[in-house]
């Protein structure tokens, strides 16, 4: 039986497996590796802190998560295609490793952020109706 997410070590397991998959993914891999040229040594610890803070209010993340995506969107438009794939991979990874109340909370919160960001990005990319 799977256990629930308990702490940052569990978050680290999810994030590591997720980004291994992201890098091999047909829709997302090239965006991270070739377009954004992400430095994984700095990106992964940031992501551990972001999700740990979101789930356990640890104060481990104090950044502004949306702006890097606006910058990326200027060189590679982020649409529902990328956002949906991001969420599918994220949820598959979480479900594979954990189950329980915190696990459901993580999935729900990530879905909410993804939906909000997707709408905000669509607004950036919409042609002006003037
Ligand atoms: C649409 C697919 C997405 C792509 C292609 C993408 C790509 C990126 C890239 C290239 C960065 C900058 C990495 C770096 O240089 O350190 C980044 C940062 C980040 N992303 Fe995403 N992302 C996506 C969706 C999401 C979603 C849905 C979330 C949250 C629910 C998220 C959370 C974050 C956070 C927290 C950061 C760190 C921001 C900071 O620098 O403080 N991303 N992402």
Image (tube, rainbow, N blue to C red):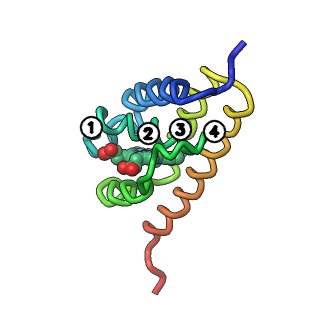
Which residue was labeled with disc 4? 106
- Between circles 3 and 1, the one closer to the viewer is 3
Is disc 2 placed on a helix, strand or loop? helix
Numbered disc total = 4
The answer to which of marks 3 and 1 sits earlier in the sequence is 1
Quarter of the image that includes the C terminus: bottom left
Q: Residue furthest front?
A: 58
Q: Which of the labelled discs sits on residue 123, or is there none? A: none
Q: Which of the labelled discs sits on residue 52, or is there none? A: 3
Quarter of the image that includes the N terminus: top right
Residue at (44%, 26%) from the top-left corner? Answer: 16
Mark 1 in CB contact with mark 2 (< 8 angstroms):
no
Is disc 1 placed on a helix, strand or loop? loop
The answer to which of marks 4 and 3 sits earlier in the sequence is 3
Mark 1 in CB contact with mark 4 (< 8 angstroms):
no
Residue at (63%, 27%) from the top-left corner? Answer: 5
* Real-space CA distance between mark 1 and mark 2, rounded to the nearest whole angstrom: 12 Å
- Horizontally, is 32 left or right of 109 in the view? left
* Real-space CA distance between mark 2 and mark 4, rounded to the nearest whole angstrom: 13 Å
Is disc 4 placed on a helix, strand or loop? helix
Which residue was labeled with disc 1? 39
């Amino acid at each position: 039986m799977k256990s629930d997410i308990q702490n940052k070590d569990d978050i680290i397991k999810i994030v590591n497996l997720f980004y291994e998959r992201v890098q091999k993914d047909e829709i997302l891999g090239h965006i991270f590796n070739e377009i954004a040229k992400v430095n994984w040594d700095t990106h992964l610890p940031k992501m551990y802190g972001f999700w740990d803070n979101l789930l356990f209010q640890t104060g481990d993340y104090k950044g502004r998560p949306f702006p890097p995506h606006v910058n990326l969107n200027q060189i590679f438009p982020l649409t529902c295609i990328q956002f949906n794939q991001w969420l599918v991979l994220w949820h598959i990874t979480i479900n594979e490793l954990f189950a329980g109340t915190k696990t459901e909370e993580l999935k729900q919160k990530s879905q909410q952020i993804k939906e909000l960001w997707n709408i905000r990005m669509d607004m950036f990319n919409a042609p002006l109706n003037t």
